[in-house]
Image (cartoon, rainbow, N blue to C red):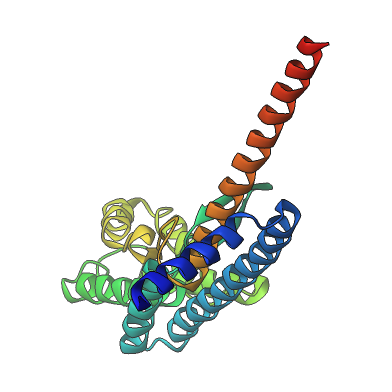
Amino acid sequence: MGGVSKKKKSKKALSKIFHISTWKLVLVLILLTFLAATLLRFDHIKMTEMRDAVLSADWEEDTGKILSSLNELRSFTLKHIIFNILDDNGEQYVIFGTGPFYLENLYIHDAKETIAKQQAEIEKNGVTDGNPNGNIFKKVAKICDSKARTYGWPYYDKRYLSCYTTELAKYPSSESLTTDLEAILPSTEAYRYEFASPIWYPCISGIVILIAAILAVWIICRIIFWLVTTIALFLLNRGTK
């Protein structure tokens, strides 16, 4: 008897749910939409904070902290719905993920080491000893250092490196040196990161979005059914007259 009673109660509960007024369902849908938007916003803020932590570690040139922060950001992004709007040369478009970001200070550090090694290797082999222009590396560094102070460049950023290779190329005897230096400088793409998030994931925001989507479909089906029924009754009543 207890089992039959429970079944009856379940049927009554389902019947009540299915007979809820459409306007009440619309109200619930609005609340769920607001809740989903709020949760998505919180996830976006959390992602931004974690991405800023990566950039902060990059600024501190803490390789261990960079790697751990990157792993945390990747893990979070893969398990949440990260709705993002990017601005690309005035054009805005929607993506799911962190968007691209660069470890600029790590690149600068590695590029600086590359230039120093190249200069030490060339001087070790005596290439600059017999150069009629003298130590061209010191001359180039002096010019680019002056430009860096004038324009406020951080040393060994992209503009400094561009100045370095451009000035070095002005010496005829250094054409091969410039080519070699450009060839061994690290690629900026190796310091570019971007993590994509799933369009849907069973996190809190994902579950709310799923419930809201099901409810929206239910409301649409109800409206369609009401329209079809109303039109059918209208045509039926018109035909009987």
Is residue 159 visible in the rendered image? The answer is: no
**Residue in the image at 40% along x and 86% along y:** 61
Residue 193 picture location, percent across and down: 39, 64
Quarter of the image for residue 112 reads: bottom left
Q: Position of residue 94 (x, y in %)?
A: 57, 51
Give the quadrant of residue 45: bottom right
Q: In which quadrant is the C terminus drawn?
A: top right
Q: Number of marks in the image? A: 0
**Left or right side of 180 for 65:** right
What residue appears at the point 75 percent right and 54 percent down from the top-left corner?
23
Q: Residue furthest front?
A: 1
Expressed as whole percent of the image width and height from the top left, the position of residue 234 reads 78, 21
Above or below — where is 233 with respect to 117?
A: above
Q: Quadrant of the N terminus?
A: bottom left
**In front of the other: 52 or 2:** 2
Residue 107's place in the image compared with 177, above or below, is below
Q: Name, please, the residue furthest toward the right.
A: 241
Q: 202 above or below 70? A: above
Q: Is residue 235 left or right of residue 214?
A: right
Q: Is residue 214 visible?
A: yes
The residue positioned 68% from the left and 30% from the top of the image is 229
In the image: residue 26, left or right of residue 66: right
Left or right of 67 on screen, residue 200: right
Give the vertical position of 173 relative to 37 (above or below): above
Please tell me in which quadrant of the rendered image residue 40 appears.
Answer: bottom right
The residue nearer to you, when weighing 86 against 5, is 5
Q: Position of residue 233 (x, y in %)?
A: 73, 24
